[in-house]
């Protein structure tokens, strides 16, 4: 194997090659001198105590030692060359390329790769850095070797017309828990849950010291239809297990789902060999290319680098409230759609709302800092893991398991269910809600009750795998159709080249992209506040399914997806006025994402509060205008168009009371149209756009009016924050002086007759001034000198001061 | 290769164990501590006997007694060039792992005779030719061609690309 070596960075450049000690064809050993070179250096000589120091330039002679053993193939420099920096030096034919290593030993020649000598320029262990076998991280290969292995694999798969399928365990194909209640139910045929748990598999696991949880029983529920699913899929796919559980756990599960080792064989990778405790990566198994790999997993966020290849399945949540017992090692789940995934429309049986809904609560802190974390771990430390983090997570997991053993959440839930059964049920239909007390009745949208004599907590009614099977076979077919087409277009059929192989990720993207094409979707109440919907898990998923995700509803919006827990948000009210928007609950979205087709919306339509729909005809007529409003992200002040808008605002509540009523104004401004920007805008920005002449008017007016009118002051531009203000303002008449001055002015401006709002002419303004209220003597200046800004500023200040004084006086009197 | 080796070890004993059967306690503790460990270049397989137990010396401050025990143990040290019998524990496209007691040896595909081919489709996957199959559980005679030691661990690379090496017929699973 020919390898070129560099001179190295540690030499004292510039150097001059003076003599070759070995020539082409010579055998060399590690550490043997290969050539001589000279370099110049400065030296201080003389007696420092007598101040007779001086520097002289001297020439040094040195040997360059061979960093490896082999035969010299070619010198890449000539005698007399001057090198100013490290460059390629010599080509040496090595007997062994050391391209596959096991724990620091070359697997071909058995030499120790971790040996370092003075001549070592780069570590031999760097020649093979890629760990690509499932069950051992100590075995590493070089990039070439990895590529060779992968091409072999692809060729073999193409011959068999298969693809690789990487399968997650927990909550994807099985659900595990250690709650001993399951065992009790299993042994008790009279228990209502007996039917559901009777085929739950168990094993005992003792993987290391774990205190209370050591050697406890694990209860494993296979996802319905799993055996057939794996059986059929093994015809199209070569399957791998990739889990965040421990090796021992993974092997136990594999024993259950694949006792003959026909499906997965030994292709199992677990947390112990993963190299990262927070993220999974296809590159761990397929380091060169992932063109023929599909992943099925219930979590997308653990595959930061392989989203394209992922088919996200609905998490299997059989043991309710248990979640993923191996999830302590993963970042907190932020699946905002929640595991319930809702019954797809196709299922005939009514499904319970699972208490996984609880996970919908806004508990996804800091999405942004999560991804860097995966990348850090993957990039910085492919094999090792952060010990401290690992330990912390291990403790966390242990605590979680212990808690499950002691608290027996399932037993409690069933007890609660039984209790509710014995009590007279207020409404039969609340049956489903009883699994968790926190659930609100709204969540029963679209579910019909089924009477039971004694209700069972666990239900065995998941049909996700049949959907996944459909997707997988469709993808497989599409992939091989493409492959055949490409092959047919070339006549050299023998050679399989990489460009002949389609990228299954692209195939998946295409198939998914068809699902919600032409849909424009807006979410409300689904993504927790403070998380940007565009980068949220669910947002990314929606976009990958071809839909156009928008932040706010417009007339182009086709679907508004509402969280059934929070059915009346601003967006809902707004969308309710646009008839073309279908307002559906999140189950519709879940169904679409699970079934890969645009599910009929009818069963999922939300009941809209009639009040919200009240004047949808007006809004519809005005649709375009509204769109324009929405599209501008800049906050817009209402002064200019308020005359027209008041019409709607008032219509909303009092039914077409068009007149501009001073007293009502406070309330009406709280605008259901969302015209007032939801984010609090900076008052300074508002000031820039304000009509200064108007302001002068207001000022004049204000000076003339009683200061006590404060009580009506309403801050116009505090936007959404205003609602809170309303409450406090009702009782509290004396608003703080400076803070509200501006709002007072605005208020007053609004209070005046509408016709003159838009007028900017100074003369007319004065007229308006007069018409409005009798101005006091001194304040007339403000209006008249309106042209000059400086004066305005002074006047304003003056007015403000005066107001302050007056107020102070008042308070003194009191 | 196995050796009988004279070794020495210092042990401490808690004051609560001080009494007439101290010697037995020290010996028991010695076995518990050293049997099955790897010192870096060899494994201590079994303690044969302990021939000298020094007088206990009380350690100042803690009250523990320290004994210096001389003992004889069977140790096993794998050598480069040694041929040993192993059991295959894992097979992949790059080669297979085999275990000889505590030592895990990797045999890469380069050091498997060319006619024994990797067959990924078999259940389980294996290396095989007409008359031999190397899969998990197969007994294989391997020649060690390199070892590396760190404190507490040993690794080795093996080869079956020589005469009389490879799968042992009696070890094949039924």
Image: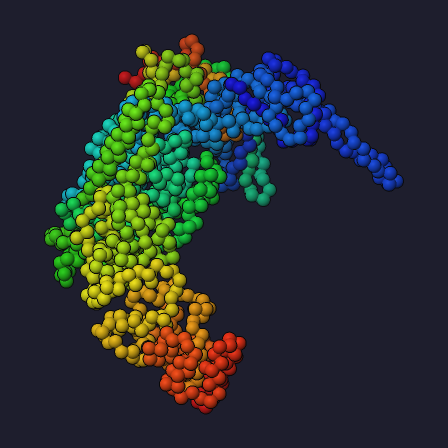
Residue beneath the point at 48% across and 87% down: A778
Residue beneath the point at 29% across and 45% down: A546
The image position of residue A698, as x and y in percent, is: 41, 80
- Foreground: A227 or A635? A635
The image position of residue A360, as x and y in percent, is: 30, 54
Q: Is residue B23 visible?
A: yes
- Foreground: A287 or A541? A541
Residue beneath the point at 32% across and 23% down: A490
State which quadrant residue A659 falls in.
bottom left
| Applied colour scheme | rainbow
- Foreground: A212 or A92? A92
Residue beneath the point at 50% across and 30% down: B152
Q: Which residue sits furthest bottom?
A: A813
State which quadrant residue A283 falls in.
top left
Using the image, determine if residue A140 lies above or below residue A783: above
Q: Is residue A801 left or right of residue A722?
A: right
The image position of residue B132, as x and y in percent, is: 33, 13
Q: Is residue A170 visible?
A: no
**Quadrant showing the C terminus of chain A:** bottom left
The image position of residue B5, as x and y in percent, is: 53, 21
Using the image, determine if residue A145 lies above or below residue A367: above
Q: How many marks?
A: 0
State which quadrant residue A742 falls in.
bottom left
Q: Which residue sits furthest top?
A: B163
Q: Is residue B130 left or right of residue A655?
A: right
Q: Is residue A387 left or right of residue A615?
A: right
Using the image, determine if residue A420 lies above or below residue B50: below
Q: Is residue B161 left or right of residue A582?
A: right
Using the image, determine if residue A202 lies above or below residue A372: above
């Amino acid at each position: 194997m020919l390898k070129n070596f560099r001179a190295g960075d540690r030499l004292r450049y510039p150097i001059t090659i003076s003599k070759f000690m070995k020539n082409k064809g010579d055998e060399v050993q590690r550490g043997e001198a290969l050539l001589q070179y000279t370099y110049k250096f400065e030296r201080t000589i003389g007696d420092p105590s007598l101040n007779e120091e001086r520097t002289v330039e001297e020439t040094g002679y040195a040997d360059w030692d061979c960093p490896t053993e082999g035969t010299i193939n070619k010198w890449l420099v000539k005698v007399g060359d001057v090198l100013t920096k490290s460059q390629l030096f010599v080509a040496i034919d090595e007997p062994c390329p050391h391209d596959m290593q096991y724990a620091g030993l070359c697997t071909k020649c058995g030499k120790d790769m971790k040996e370092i000598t003075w001549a070592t320029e780069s570590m031999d262990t760097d020649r093979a850095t890629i760990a690509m076998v499932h069950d051992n991280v100590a075995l590493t290969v070089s990039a070439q070797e990895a590529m060779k292995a992968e091409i072999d694999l692809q060729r073999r798969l193409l011959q068999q017309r298969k693809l690789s399928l990487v399968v997650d365990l927990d909550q994807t194909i099985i659900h595990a828990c250690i709650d001993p209640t399951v065992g009790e139910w299993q042994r008790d045929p009279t228990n209502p849950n007996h039917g559901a748990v009777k085929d739950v598999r168990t094993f005992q696991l003792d993987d290391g010291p774990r205190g209370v949880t050591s050697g406890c029983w694990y209860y494993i529920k296979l996802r319905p239809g799993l055996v057939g699913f794996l059986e059929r899929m093994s015809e199209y796919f070569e399957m791998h297990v990739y889990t965040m559980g421990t090796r021992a756990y993974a092997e136990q599960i594999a024993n259950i789902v694949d006792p003959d080792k026909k499906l997965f064989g030994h292709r199992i990778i677990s947390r112990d060999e993963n190299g990262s405790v927070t993220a999974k990566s296809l590159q761990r198994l397929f380091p060169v290319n992932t063109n023929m790999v599909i992943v099925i997993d219930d979590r997308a966020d653990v595959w930061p680098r392989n989203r394209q290849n992922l088919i996200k399945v609905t998490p299997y949540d059989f043991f309710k409230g248990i979640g993923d017992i191996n999830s302590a090692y993963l970042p907190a789940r932020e699946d905002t759609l929640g595991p319930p995934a809702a019954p797809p429309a196709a299922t005939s049986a009514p499904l319970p709302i699972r208490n996984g809904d609880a996970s919908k609560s806004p508990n996804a802190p800091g999405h942004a800092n999560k991804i860097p974390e995966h990348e850090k771990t993957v990039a910085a430390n492919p094999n090792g893991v952060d010990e401290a983090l690992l330990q912390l997570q291990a403790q966390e997991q242990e605590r979680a398991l212990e808690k499950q053993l002691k608290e027996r959440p399932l037993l409690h839930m069933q007890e609660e269910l039984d209790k509710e059964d014995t009590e007279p049920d207020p409404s039969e239909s609340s049956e489903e809600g009883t699994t968790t007390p926190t659930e609100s009745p709204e969540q029963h949208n679209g579910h019909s009750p089924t009477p039971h004599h004694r209700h069972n907590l666990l239900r065995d009614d998941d049909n996700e795998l049949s959907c996944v099977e459909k997707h997988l076979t469709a993808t497989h077919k599409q992939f091989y159709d493409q492959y055949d087409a490409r092959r047919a277009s070339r006549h050299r059929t023998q050679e399989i080249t990489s460009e002949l192989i389609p990228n299954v990720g692209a195939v998946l993207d295409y198939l998914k992209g068809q699902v919600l094409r032409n849909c424009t979707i807006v979410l409300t109440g689904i993504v927790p506040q403070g998380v940007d919907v565009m980068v949220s898990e669910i947002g990314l998923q929606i976009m990958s399914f071809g839909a156009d995700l928008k932040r706010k509803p417009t007339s182009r919006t086709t679907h508004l997806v509402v969280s059934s827990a929070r059915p009346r948000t601003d967006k809902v009210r707004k969308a309710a006025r646009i008839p073309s928007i279908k307002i559906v609950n999140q189950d519709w979205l879940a169904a679409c994402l699970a079934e890969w087709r645009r599910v009929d919306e009818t069963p999922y339509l939300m009941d809209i509060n009639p009040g919200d729909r009240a004047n949808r005809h007006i809004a519809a007529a005005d649709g375009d205008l509204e769109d324009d409003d929405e599209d501008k992200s800049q906050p817009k002040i209402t002064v200019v168009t308020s005359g027209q808008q008041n019409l709607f605002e008032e219509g909303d509540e009092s039914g077409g009371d068009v007149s501009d009523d001073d007293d009502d104004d406070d309330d009406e401004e709280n605008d259901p149209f969302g015209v007032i920007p939801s984010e609090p805008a900076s008052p300074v920005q508002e000031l820039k756009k304000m009509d200064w002449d108007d302001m002068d008017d207001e000022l004049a007016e204000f000076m003339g009016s009683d200061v006590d009118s404060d009580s009506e002051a309403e801050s116009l531009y505090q936007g959404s924050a205003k609602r809170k203000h309303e409450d406090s303002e009702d009782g509290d008449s004396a608003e703080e002086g400076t803070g509200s001055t501006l709002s007072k002015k605005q208020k007053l401006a609004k209070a005046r007759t509408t016709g003159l709002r838009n007028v900017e002419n100074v003369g007319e303004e004065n007229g308006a001034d007069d018409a409005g209220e009798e101005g006091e003597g001194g304040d007339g200046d403000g209006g008249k000198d309106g042209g000059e800004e400086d004066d305005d500023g002074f006047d304003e200040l003056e007015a403000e001061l005066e107001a302050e004084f007056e107020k102070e006086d008042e308070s003194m009197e009191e | 290769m196995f050796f009988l080796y004279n070794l020495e070890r210092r042990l401490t004993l808690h004051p609560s164990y001080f009494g007439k059967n101290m010697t037995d306690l020290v010996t028991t503790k010695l076995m518990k501590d050293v049997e099955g460990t790897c010192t870096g270049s060899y494994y201590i397989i079994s303690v044969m006997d302990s021939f000298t137990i020094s007088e206990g010396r009380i350690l100042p401050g803690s009250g523990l007694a320290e004994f210096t025990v001389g003992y004889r143990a069977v140790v096993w040290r794998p050598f480069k060039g040694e041929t040993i019998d192993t059991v295959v524990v894992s097979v992949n496209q790059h080669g297979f792992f085999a275990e000889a007691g505590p030592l895990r040896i990797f045999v890469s595909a380069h050091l498997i005779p060319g006619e024994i081919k990797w067959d990924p489709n078999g259940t389980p996957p294996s290396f095989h030719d007409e008359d031999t199959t190397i899969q998990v559980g197969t007994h294989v005679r391997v020649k060690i061609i390199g070892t590396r030691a760190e404190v507490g661990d040993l690794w080795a690379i093996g080869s079956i690309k020589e005469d009389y090496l490879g799968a042992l017929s009696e070890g094949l699973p039924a």
